[in-house]
Amino acid sequence: MSFTLAIVGRPNVGKSTLFNRLVGKRLALVDDQPGVTRDLREGAARLGDLRFTVIDTAGLEDANDDSLPGRMRRLTERAVDMADICLFLVDARTGITPTDRVFAEILRKRAAHVILAANKAEGAAADAGVLEAWELGLDEPIRLSAEHGEGLNELYAQLMPIA
Ligand code: GDP
Ligand code: MG
């Protein structure tokens, strides 16, 4: 069975880096897809033997302050509604911010399945941030490094039973 995974989280946590890693060169067709605006990038992802559609909430790059403007919220909610599973990324290096907590609340209310991942988790500098991620009241955070490709086996293990 195929499914749709939305990568959500505040700006700069590494969503697009992970999207690119999951999609690789298979970013075809995106622009022409009906119903997908340029704010939501969609790609064909592969992880082990799993094949799925992944959505990146792009278009938030200008929202650099740590607030949650309505546009970010609406875009996230749209991605959540399109998805079977949400992958909620936080930044293990900066730790949990108030905006992360708002995202957690949206996801708790709205998403069928939420997987929490603490990204940028390569190295000991991320240990405190990974621990902090437990405070969000979701499941155990995956230690992820989108940039270095670490933790993808754990992501696979969490996707597998839901997919
Ligand atoms: P987005 O705004 O959530 O889409 O975040 P981006 O994917 O654009 O990444 C924001 C910044 O974080 C970039 O400079 C990335 O290179 C960096 N980044 C992404 N993943 C990692 C990671 O696993 N470790 C580290 N150290 N940096 C990362
Ligand atoms: Mg991005």
Image: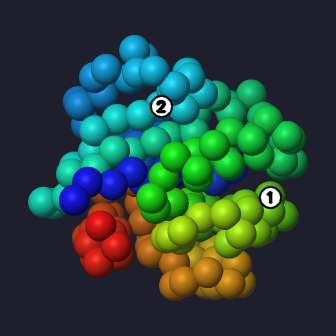
Report the amino acid beneath label 1: Thr
Residue at 54% in and 68% down: 112
125 or 62, nearer to the observer:
62
Residue at 68% in and 39% down: 75
> x, y percentage for residue 58?
58, 33
Disc 1 to disc 2: CB gap under 8 Å: no
Residue at 30% in and 28% down: 27
Q: Could you classify mark 2 by the number of other residues whose Cα lies within 10 Å: few (under 14), some (14-19), or many (20 or more)?
A: many
Report the amino acid beneath label 2: Arg
Q: Secondary structure at mark 1?
A: helix
Q: Could you classify mark 1 by the number of other residues whose Cα lies within 10 Å: few (under 14), some (14-19), or many (20 or more)?
A: some
Residue at the spot of label 1: 99
Residue at the spot of label 2: 41
Task: Mark yes or no: residue 26 visible.
Answer: yes
Q: Quadrant of residue 146?
A: bottom left
Q: Quadrant of residue 79?
A: top right
**Residue at the left extreme of this rendering:** 49
> x, y percentage for residue 149?
31, 56
Q: Does any atom of ligand 1 lie closer than 8 Å to the CB of label 1?
A: no
Q: Nearer the viewer, mark 1 or mark 2?
A: 2
Tell me the quarter of the image containing the N terminus: bottom left
Upstream in sequence: badge 1 or badge 2: 2
Vertical relation: 91 (above or below) 35: below
